[in-house]
Amino acid sequence: MNLLDKTKSYFSSEAELEITRNRELSKMISTQGNTYDISTPTPNYDIGYETTNDDDLEDLETARNTARLKVKNNGFAKGILKAATDHVVGNGLNARSTINRRRMKNLSEDQIKNIENDLNDYWDDWVDSQNSDVTGLNNFLLQQRLAYYVYKRDGENFASLPIINNEISLKLIGAEFIEGDNEGFSFGIKTNKNKLPIAYRVLTSSETNKYQTISNNNIKKNMLHTFNRERIDMLRGFPFLSEIARDVDYIDDYMKTELKAAKVAALFVGSIETAATQDVFKKPNSDLSGMSSSNPTINENDKVFHDSQITQLQKGETLNIHSQSRDNPNFDKLVNTSLQKVAACTRLPIEIILTIFTSSYSASRASMLMMQKFIGPERLLLNTTFNNPIRNQVIEWGVLTGRLDIPNFFQNKKEYLRCEWVGDAMGSVDPVKDVNAKVTAIDNNLTTRTKATRDLGNGDFETNIKQLEKENKMLDEANLSIKEEDEEDINN
């Protein structure tokens, strides 16, 4: 401000507000016609960083701690992470062996099927065992869910695969324990000339400042790192909530403020009006302005209110009820507008975030299909960086220790380790429509019964066939099944 503006502001706060508003408006008008230049700094963005590490990772610790505080103190933020975890991982992603038959021509279909069953059984045993968690508290599916939740909250998740008691185990490591910028390490990670991570510097004791180096090699991948790489040469990941941290806070604060206002509005507010006479305050009528008056003395036994209920009024008194009328008609509009930005940044549909489906079948179905587009890439990332490396090492260790007998495993390792990760089905808004759609697709050879069974969340097709065969046999033995001739008699 110049001297004149400062003088005006000193004597008038309204003038100061007007001056500030006019200056900001002038800035906006003066820059509207300028051609945008990406190299020109703006008031909202800092430009000058040369490398990915300088640009992204300098504020990584602050961003991670901020995200953790948001999740800790803001239920809305935690709900977003849990919604992502529930839909991507759910009850867990489990592997089903799918050996490449075209490349395994020396094996018959029965042999391949038996090997697949052996691989599935061995993997399932490890998943349910305490070996899948170094602490012995969780099985692999629970570890998998925790790993994904931590990855979305912190932006990354680390895990090591130590061998304990001659078994492969899984140990999750917090992102704050991977640090260090010396001895060739950058932000706790050492890479080769091709930027491939080859070693990790893990803090083992903060009191003694001791570190352990965990290296990866071509034989065994000892450290797993799950994060979403958004830029070339990016070594670490950023929290999922970083882009919407302020928006989530605004929504939470606004909702709490509206709830407080509604609570105040719900309180009973009333006043008692006393008819003014010359005898009320013992003063003449000319002094009955009320400016210097005091309330008349009321006997304790004649109180107007008892337990928040009106019992009686004194003679000459009138009860006035004051309505608060604090219903904000713009509440839903403002919250939904903020949620649109949250949905755009997170790619989570608003209906999924709020778990409210009040529109038509088509709108609800569209939201679930959009959620599938979010789930697909997320599962691909989790399977590639976490699930597949763990399963591969567990299977290989089973072969090395003699627990799995698979012919020529290491010569055909890639074909033997092929698998499909199966998770919870998407669900159905209208089960009848979805089932009829799957039946039509099967009849027109557009999908398989195995895939349709999994998509509908009805388990495994082959397992269902065997179970149905067993159940039908039991019904026949109990003479409870309906024969074809009986059906014809019923129809006639």
Image (cartoon, grey):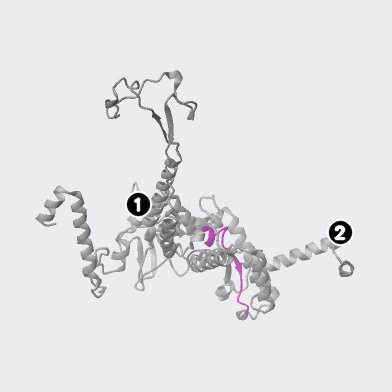
Query: SS for tag 2?
Result: loop
Q: Does any portion of residue 169 appear in the rendered image?
A: no
Question: 10 Å neighbourhood of mark 1: few (<14), some, or many (≥20)?
Answer: few
Answer with the quarter of the image where residue 414 lies. Answer: bottom right
Quick check: 43 left or right of 68? left
Answer with the quarter of the image where residue 413 lies. Answer: bottom right
Spatial CA span between label 2 and label 1 = 70 Å
Considering only order in the chain, which callout, 1 or 2, is on the residue closer to the N terminus?
A: 1
Q: Nearest the camera: 126 or 281?
A: 281
Residue 20's spot in the image, x, y percent?
20, 57
Pointer 2 and pointer 1: residues touching (CB < 8 Å)?
no
From this viewpoint, which residue is outermost toward the left? 3
Residue 339 in magenta? Answer: no
Residue 299's spot in the image, x, y percent?
41, 18
Quadrant (top left/top right/bottom left/bottom right) for the C terminus: bottom right
Q: Nearest the camera: 382 or 253?
A: 253
Answer with the quarter of the image where residue 287 lies. Answer: top left
Residue 2's spot in the image, x, y percent?
11, 57
Quadrant (top left/top right/bottom left/bottom right) for the N terminus: bottom left
Q: Amino acid at mark 2?
A: Ala
Residue 92 in magenta? Answer: yes
Reading the image, the residue beneath label 2 is 478
Q: Nearer the viewer, mark 2 or mark 1?
A: 2
Query: Which residues fall within the magenta stretch?
Result: 85-101
Reading the image, the residue beneath label 1 is 210
